[in-house]
Amino acid sequence: MTTQARFPAVSRLLHWLMAPMIVAMLFIGVGMAASVSARYELLVSIHRPLGMAIFVLCVIRFVNRFINPPPELPDTVPSVQRFAAKASHIVLYTLMFIMPLVGWGMLSAARYPIVLYGPLRLPPILPHDLTLYAWLRDLHTGLAFGKCWSVPDNL
Amino acid sequence: MKLFWFEAGPVRSGGVLVRLGAIGAVMLSVAGAFAYVGGWLSPVRLTQDRMMAAFEDANGTHAGFRRNHAKGVCVTGWFESSGQAAALSKAAVFRPGRIPVVGRFALAGGMPFQTDAPATVRSMALRFLLPGGEEWRTGMNNIPVFPVNSARGFYEQLLASSADPVTGKPDPVRIKAFLAAHPETVRALPLIKQHQVTSGFANSTFNSLNAFRFVDAAGASVPVRWSTVPVQPFAADSAEPSAAGDKNYLFDNLIAQIAQHPRQWRLIVTIGQADDPTNDATLPWPAGRRQIDAGTVTIDHASSEDGGRCTAVNYDPLVLPSGIEPSDDPLLSARSAAYARSFTLRADEEHEKPPSAVTAREVQAGGKS
């Protein structure tokens, strides 16, 4: 079992940097949506910048994939598992990329100021629209639960 | 990314079972932790859902409306800063100059069609649109202190004051039990009852109730509370004006007054001292604290919530510009959380929402309903 190709170091670093961030985001998200205590404010103030950090890392990861292509799956992996691995991978990549954008977009549509840290804030990317907010807010929750399923598949 | 493959090769069936069992155990504990964080395993923890359910129990379901302060009108105008608060807060809103304001006047309670009454708490919410995309949002009430000092207290008060399904009135036994458990409310209620109710929105003083902190350019901070104090002269509420049959008399008078000429409030900032309570909205600060006239809010236009500029706005008290920070008052985070959930619920229900009590036609008619 020593002949197996390994992932390049950059890819491994990105993976192990992002995996705990994404898992933390899911817990922070579900926790803040349930809380009315002082934790709410704290969790929201972590959720926004952490989400954007994941977005930036996701873009870097995508570029890295072309520079450092991942090794092929071992020949011994059956085709059904191959397909499952590939599909869940695509789902996770898509979710990682879309989730922060949906979050940014929904806050924009609600016209919440998107504060990252102190005076550092993001501009709105969508018009102020309650219906659009409702749609994106539901999508954000739906995708988060989707991510709960796809994250363990990709660890 | 798949970093660790299962080792390829023959695996004994017992080994597979152990591995599958281990994976299952990990998944179950993660799912359990997730459910715990989400509050699904803790029936007594106060969550946003339970707070919303309490509003619904107390007021019924009113799709598309705010869960609290449900009956309101939108207003617009501007804030002219005097520059006097600029030494205490670096917030751009306090530099001399004029910035636009989008506001909302409302009555407390989750009933969007309740009849206007003098004793109902009145509120003024303001959204200051600072240059560079910053915002300051604040919701203020015409009472001197808040009746509760925690999310739990608010929730229990809401439950205790909901109408009993049999009698149609709040159950005195439950109210007594609530008061016994909340001495801070017992202390606050006389102060709230003492304040003299004015004839309308335009001559009401609205108070932030919660404390905040002003931060200056050097990073030094002071505790503050703020109020909007009417320029319009005081007039005591005359008895039973709603007997004349106008269910919206408070709103209609405000609309008629604004149509005549703009109405104004001074933004008065009270500076607390080091030992003044900042984490308890039921406690007033001692009289004689230093006050600053930060500027004047002018309201020159009113409109119905239906199509009005305040409707798609959540007056979240934690939307603050750089230079104003939250205090340690737990109600701030609780209000922010509950408002956010209320905002999301009514956004979801937007297509089901009936017209607001104060309609666009009523505003166009100059406040005649």
Image (tube, helix red, strand yellow):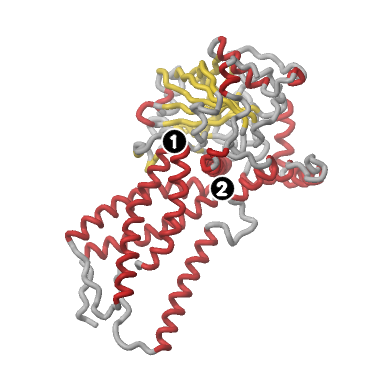
- Name the image quarter holding residue B179: top right
Across and down, in percent, residue A39 comes to: 51, 50
Q: Nearer the viewer, residue B106 or B154?
A: B106
Helix, strand or loop under label 1: loop
Residue B205, compared with residue B29, is above or below; it is above
Question: Is there any visible trace of residue B270 in the rendered image?
Answer: no
Side of B109 where B344 appears, left or right = left
Query: From mark 1 to mark 2, how far is it between C-alphas?
Result: 26 Å
Question: Is there any visible trace of residue B351 in the rendered image?
Answer: yes
> In the drawing, what numbered circle is on residue A129?
1
Residue B91, compared with residue B55, is above or below; it is above
Check disc 2 and give the amino acid type: Val
The residue singled out by tag 2 in the image is A36
Most distant residue in the left direction: A67
Task: Using the image, name the chain to which the residue with label 1 belongs.
Answer: A
Across and down, in percent, residue B12 comes to: 38, 89
Most distant residue in the top direction: B260
Side of B185 where A117 appears, left or right = left
Q: Nearer the viewer, residue B55 or B89?
A: B55
Across and down, in percent, residue A113 comes to: 41, 37
Across and down, in percent, residue B6 comes to: 32, 79
Residue at image position (72%, 36%) is B187
Residue A90, compared with residue A47, is above or below; it is below
Task: Using the image, name the chain to which the residue with label 2 belongs.
Answer: A
Q: Which corner quadrant holds the N terminus of chain A?
A: bottom left
Q: Earlier in the sequence, mark 1 or mark 2?
A: 2
Residue at image position (49%, 66%) is B31
